[in-house]
Image (cartoon, rainbow, N blue to C red):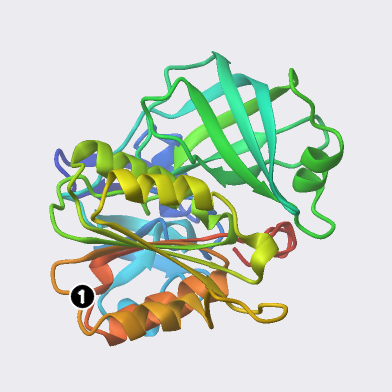
Amino acid sequence: MSATIRVLSDPPQSAPALAGETILESLLQAGVAFPHNCQSGNCGACKCELIDGDTLELPYSEYALSAEERARNLILACRTQVWGDCSVRPLDADEMVLHPSRVMRCRVVDIQELTHDIRGLQLAILSGGPYGFSAGQHARLKFAPGIPERSYSMANVAEQPTLEFHIRQVPRGQASGYVFTNLRVGAEVMVSGPLGNAYWRETHRGPMLAIAGGSGMAPIKSIIETALLDDPTRTIHCYFGVREERDVYLESYLVELGRRHPNLHVQIVLSQPHGPTRRRTGTVAEAVTKDFGLFDGFKAYVAGPPAMVEAAHSKLESKGLAARDIHADAFYSQAEDAFNLR
């Protein structure tokens, strides 16, 4: 049995589907661009509205799709099987930006030690470009045969000729372990993307809130730089949360950026400092909610560990920021990927 999936976008699109395929599988196989990331029901990138149709939902994470959202007929395209004709509407269809998908051969041109457990990679594109993406998106990186692909956010702005990634070492992580022990300047890396919908909304002219946890600074760096290139006077409040002093990085970069752009306000927050500190302490979500009463006119961009992202999302909504104005990207470990928790 075959069916038709209708995507109510501008312009409308459609794709054939076999019974039992997920909506996302069918759309991608037909060449229909649709926001997605983990493809396992944990990130929420493919969230959309089910208008009508015969479908069956597979298990998914409540982080990716809450009960309240499901009550409003929102679904995850990657976890919804097609059993008859159906129609879906992407979220933020008026803001949706889609870039051509690329698979690129790249070369490592620099490796930097950003912290004790984060490495910065600079990659030059050898073939498969040009590579267009929106600030805040990510790509899949393949370092070597036998090493699984992993997702990492671009930290550079799209106009720069080299790609920048921040790789955090994950305990027992195959990909990050390879980067820390085997990857050398001159090595080739396969990069495919872009992916993700937690990107900078360029039509928004109001103030921005940018919250990063750990290596979540990579997409936040890209978003802040891109937004300031668009409007050097834009008001941005950036919060960077890490465990302890040794986890802080890019501080001099942020200070210099703030010197050149007085409307950029940066706060660094330590959640588990070892010994006395002059910095703010506590969780980054708590720091944000202490500093603001309401978030009228704001859009928020959040990236980092799932627990931090979920806490920040909850705190922001409790302060009146609408879910549609919170663009979040949670970073899952290899272990969580392996157990299909992302």
Q: Is residue 34 left or right of residue 50?
A: right
The mark tally for this picture is 1
Percent position (x, y) of residue 122?
Answer: 60, 29
Q: Is residue 261 left or right of residue 247?
A: left
- Where is residue 236, by image quadrant? bottom left
Percent position (x, y) of residue 21?
Answer: 49, 52
Percent position (x, y) of residue 250?
Answer: 54, 49
Q: Is residue 319 above or below residue 163?
A: below
Q: Please, what is the three-letter code of the amino acid marked with disc 1?
A: Phe
For the residue pair 192 and 269, the one nearer the viewer reads as: 269
- Residue 52 seen in render: no
Residue placed at 66% from the left, 61% from the top? 247
- Residue 76 seen in render: yes
Quarter occupied by the C terminus: bottom right
- Where is residue 208, by image quadrant? bottom left
Residue placed at 48% from the left, 71% from the top? 309
For the residue pair 31 and 251, the one nearer the viewer reads as: 251
For the residue pair 307 and 253, the one nearer the viewer reads as: 253
Percent position (x, y) of residue 190?
Answer: 64, 26
Residue placed at 26% from the left, 43% from the top? 228
Q: Is residue 285 above or below residue 120?
A: below
Circle 1 residue: 295
Circle 1: element type: loop
For the residue pair 262 and 72, the one nearer the viewer reads as: 262
Q: Is residue 182 left or right of residue 63?
A: right
Q: Single out the residue that lies furthest toward the top.
A: 127
Local crowd size for mark 1, using a 10 Å CA cut-off: few (<14), some (14–19), many (≥20):
some
